[in-house]
Image: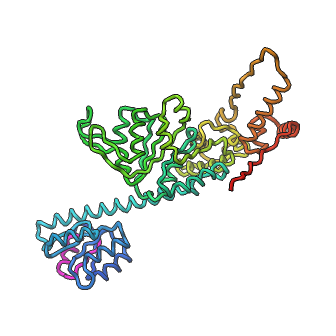
Amino acid sequence: MLIVDDEELYRKALERILTRVGHNVITARDATEALVAVAEHSIDLVLSDIQMPGINGLELVRQIREIAPDLPCIVITGYGSAEQSVEALRAGAFWYLEKPFDQGHLDVVRRLVEQAIEVGRLKSENRMLQRQLQSRYQFENIVGSSPALHSVLDVVAKVAETDSTVLITGESGTGKELIARAIHYNSPRATRMLVTVNCGAIPEELLESELFGHVKGAFTNAIRHREGRFTVADGGTIFLDEIGDMSPNLQVKLLRVLQDRTFEPVGSSKTVSVDVRVLAATNQDLEQAIRERRFREDLYYRLNVIPIEVPPLRNRRDDIPLLIHHFLEVANADKQRQVSGFSAEAMELLCSHNWPGNVRELENLVERLVVLCVEGEVQIHDLPPQITKPTAPTVPVPQLPPGGLSFRGVVDDFESNLILQALEQTHWNKNQAARLLGLNRTTLLEKIKKKGLEEKEPEESDDV
């Protein structure tokens, strides 16, 4: 703690009072000494007189705010001027005190000092957490090097700096929320709130109040006014996960928020305006939901300003080893284990698995293996049966038409189709495609050559 006062009597009196209650105190006679002390010491509070020769206390507060914005300052005035007190608060002071200090004021001084230090600590912690979040969700921390993931991150980098509404689609477990957080924490709104709402996890009758808030008496058990998530996110971003599960009634109200950023809390006729960026995500086919009249077409077009489709893990198999090593490091540190890695055979099986639960399923499996194996290398016998003995998929049987068909032709087409699917899923990696089909690599190569299957080159565009 730093006490700044050109009057030695008050400086020493405050030092004695605050040292007695457990604070480490250093003192300065003027603003110049104070600024040196702030630069050289770890200080949690500044108490400064206003009237000092040279730089006065108000200017000192302004300069401290520039170099240490979270450091609280309490100013001391000997005149009790209301205008001067207001000016001190505008300069950034936490509060002000009036001289002289009698015995009755000492308890007030002690409480005010404790409050100021606590507020400064909370501000510093909040700023540190914000920096950690921004660092955690930088693009380079999203694990993967596949072309499919890179194309997604290219779009994310472009839209992050804007305020456009984004609709993130993809299967469950692909990392849609991770993409939403990357957009927010790389945007101009990064220092403000990111509020997440899972529209599928909150009952319909409660979701409206959760989003828009309610006033006291709006419904049974509404015993006090409550702000909604849109109000909390004012100035920041709101992420509406599983937007496809929202009821038609709420879809109408959400459409209005997207159009003019206004709404009424439940039970209120007062219109609330907010400055919020909206990100939404779903694992549903919203165009199919529109055809089935489960989702409003006008809301879809309002949400789908910037569409981002997150690819399933089976379409970015090159990322599987990178993800496994990343989750292995995290789980070892978290569970205090020493699993060194995966054998080549185990890694090969993991890379060929289809991962219906996507990245979330892979992360959970790695954590489970780390907990059970404790140390050493994960072997094939450590893997669960769904990895080592995958269930064969049900293959549809074509119906024989009344006029008959070419048996060899149908079988040949069916075989070609399966081979092409395996090659496309593995980006024409013939080793992985052979594993998917349960064939030897040489057998697959012979079939590819015999059928004349070739990887399609991307079509060139004539557009300028």
| Image x and y of residue 183, in percent | 51, 53
Rendered-image quadrant of the C terminus? bottom right
Residue 51 picture quarter = bottom left
Which portion, as a residue range, is magenta? Answer: 1-19
Residue 395 picture quarter = top right
State the colouring used for the structure image: rainbow
Q: Is residue 11 magenta?
A: yes
Which of the pair 280/351 is nearer the observer?
280
Q: Main secondary structure of the magenta part?
A: helix
Q: How many dots with numbers?
A: 0
Q: Residue at x 62, y 41 (%)?
A: 312
| Image x and y of residue 95, in percent | 23, 66
User: Vertically, is 146 above or below 399?
Assistant: below
Question: Does residue 95 appear left or right of residue 151 in this picture?
Answer: left
Question: Does residue 238 appear left or right of residue 336 in this picture?
Answer: left
Q: Residue at x 18, y 77 (%)?
A: 10
| Image x and y of residue 226, in percent | 29, 43
Residue 368 picture quarter = top right
Q: Give the residue furthest to the bottom.
A: 54
Rendered-image quadrant of the N terminus? bottom left
Q: Is residue 305 magenta?
A: no
Question: Does residue 188 appear left or right of residue 332 in this picture?
Answer: left
Which of the pair 428/11 is nearer the observer?
428
Q: Residue at x 26, y 68 (%)?
A: 90
User: Vertically, is 404 above or below 446?
Assistant: above
Question: Does residue 304 appear left or right of residue 435 in this picture?
Answer: left
